[in-house]
Image (cartoon, rainbow, N blue to C red):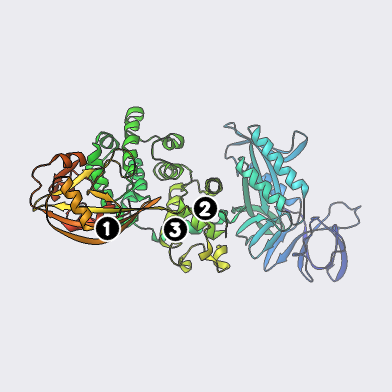
Amino acid sequence: MKYTEIVSAEFIERPNRFIAYVELMGVRTKVHVKNTGRCRELLTDHARVYLEKSGNASRATAYDLVAVEKDGRLVNMDSNAPNKAAGEWLRAGGLYRDVSLVRPEKTFGSSRFDFYVESESGRKAYIEVKGVTLEREGVAAFPDAPSERAVKHVEELMEARRQGYEAYLLFVIQMKGVCYIEPNWGTQPAFGEALKRARKEGVRLLAYDCLVREGSMELDAPLPVYLDSLDRIARPLLAWYDAGRRILPWREEPTPYHVWLSEIMLQQTRVEAVKPYYDRFLQALPDIRSLAAVEEEKLLKLWEGLGYYNRARNLKKAAEILVSEHGGEMPDDYEKILSLPGIGSYTAGAVSSIAFGRAHPAVDGNVLRILSRLRADGRDILNAKVKKSVEDELLDVMPGDRPGDFNQALMELGATVCIPNGAPRCEECPWKELCLARSKGQAAAFPNKAKKKPRSVEEKTILVIQDAERVALRKRPEKGLLAGMYEFPSLEGHCEEAGVSAYLKEIGLSPIRIRKLPPAKHVFTHKEWHMTGYLIRVDELAGKGPGQDREGFVFVEPEQTRTDYPIPSAFAAYAEQVEMRRGVGKRLRFHDS
């Protein structure tokens, strides 16, 4: 929009909202201020202002004050300018390229919006425009004074959205040099809360800065609208991720199967530990159909060392469903992915966003931790309601063009910088200027977790029974902890050598020698095994007596444990006694199970 006749002057004072005095060509002159807001930050002593000559000769003031210089730039102060500039932008196809109708001052219900717009393709939208002149250190804010009318407009936009229209709140920032706009929380928090509700209901929040000249103003560049600290995280996070993300095999080929498999493997297990198992698993089971068809013992053998074996069983169950109901393919549907066995909201969000590019959050303990530090959020991250709240909040701020990278960047930040144990590497963090916990020096105080119920402790005596060629194993029950896995025989409690000898005699074994082994401990989610052990050499394990049949013993060569007999990592310390060459490489590295 353009003005017809502009002159410059020097500001003197503003006795009320509508009137100001300026020095114009050496004369103290009364002018009309075309902005009823405070403008205290703009109209300062001796500020250079710009006046438009009024076309109304009968007016008491011959000029309107429409712009002011601030920090070397021009700021438009004309309350009518934002709607005029927005109208030009809309007619030029700024919102709809195929715009067919732009109608100003359109009635909606009992109120009126600034614009109603239609497109040739059938889209229809109501638009409310807000001019913005308040700026501090590159951040614009609205409103500059409490405005119940502004809150009402936002609520009416929500109603338009509910009735099936597109709805937009357009902030026209009447200057350049602004980084983003946010609600003026200190002046009117109700407006900011209304914006949050509106965004959840689908109202689009747009902001554009303006090219302001002495005689004109036009919309120029889009700017972000930040309602919360979360709104500010995507840009620096993705820039950091792009600059130094880790090269991981499942990232380089992010097919639905690869993403799904890797996310299940990575639960409770470090990335570096997962890599060789991931490669080995894919060599054996390259697709969903082969996973569905694999025998369980082979599956568990492939999983051996990763622990939490129900993860593997649920993979197979889900694969069987995918084969029978989806043609052996992962569906591009979040709810259908979520319904599969072993898949929760985190894994469903990861697969949906990374493999299919859908905007669904993937929130796990890592994400909850880093966001609790970012916002100094003292809520209990183990509370399911807190997790659901964070998922909803992230959904509002996920970049629609890079949801998978956004989720992976959050994972990366939690794994490499904002780490759970030890001091977080705050100086390397892309959010170091945003993080409240860091600014307060309280990073170690977050996250907050409710104390868990203490784990129960079970004492066991592990028996490594072997002859010159074989070792005795037995299969665990098909249900319960480590279901269907193979283990060394064991006795409840910590037994002395005499008790072990008596047990061996009872099952028909005569030991040549018995040697006590060092104690070991294994921690499960809800219990701990505190173990002692004995290495027992017998003459021969050739024939099984009735006692051994009762115990379910099998006698195997160590080499067979590589292919046929999956042994949980809980027994790692004792498996080493028979030098079982199992798993990846010369010797398996055991992890929690």
Residue at coordinates 25% horizontally, 49% vertically from top-left? Answer: 490
Drawn side of residue 14 relative to residue 548, left or right: right
Q: What secondary structure is found at the residue carrying circle 2?
A: loop
- Depth check: give the residue in front, 56 or 393: 393
Q: Nearer the viewer, mark 3 or mark 1?
A: 1
Observer-nearest of 486 and 290: 486
The disc at residue 217 is none
Give me the disc on residue 532. 1
Residue 111's x, y, as percent? 77, 37
Disc 2 to disc 3: CB gap under 8 Å: no
Q: Secondary structure at mark 3?
A: helix
Q: The disc labelled 1 sits on which kind of residue?
A: Thr
Residue in the picture at 84% in, 52% down: 55
483 relative position to 31: left or right: left
Question: How far across and how far down the image is residue 10, in percent?
Answer: 80, 69
> Is residue 70 visible to us here?
yes
Residue 353 appears left or right of 374: left
Q: Which residue appears farthest toward the top when viewing the image?
A: 324
Q: Give 66 or 562, whichever is nearer the viewer.
A: 562
Q: Position of residue 284 (x, y in %)?
A: 22, 42
Give the number of the disc on residue 381: 2
Q: Which residue corresponds to mark 3? A: 414
Q: Is residue 410 left or right of residue 166?
A: left
Counting every numbered tag in the picture gives 3
Residue that appears at 68% across and 44% down: 87
Q: Residues within 10 Å of mark 3 (few under 14, many from 20)?
A: many
The kind of secondary structure element at disc 1 is: strand
Q: Amino acid at mark 2?
A: Ile
Determine contact: label 3, label 1, CB under 8 Å: no
Give the alpha-carbon distance from disc 2 to disc 3, as whole Å.
Answer: 14 Å
Report if residue 586 is visible in the image.
no
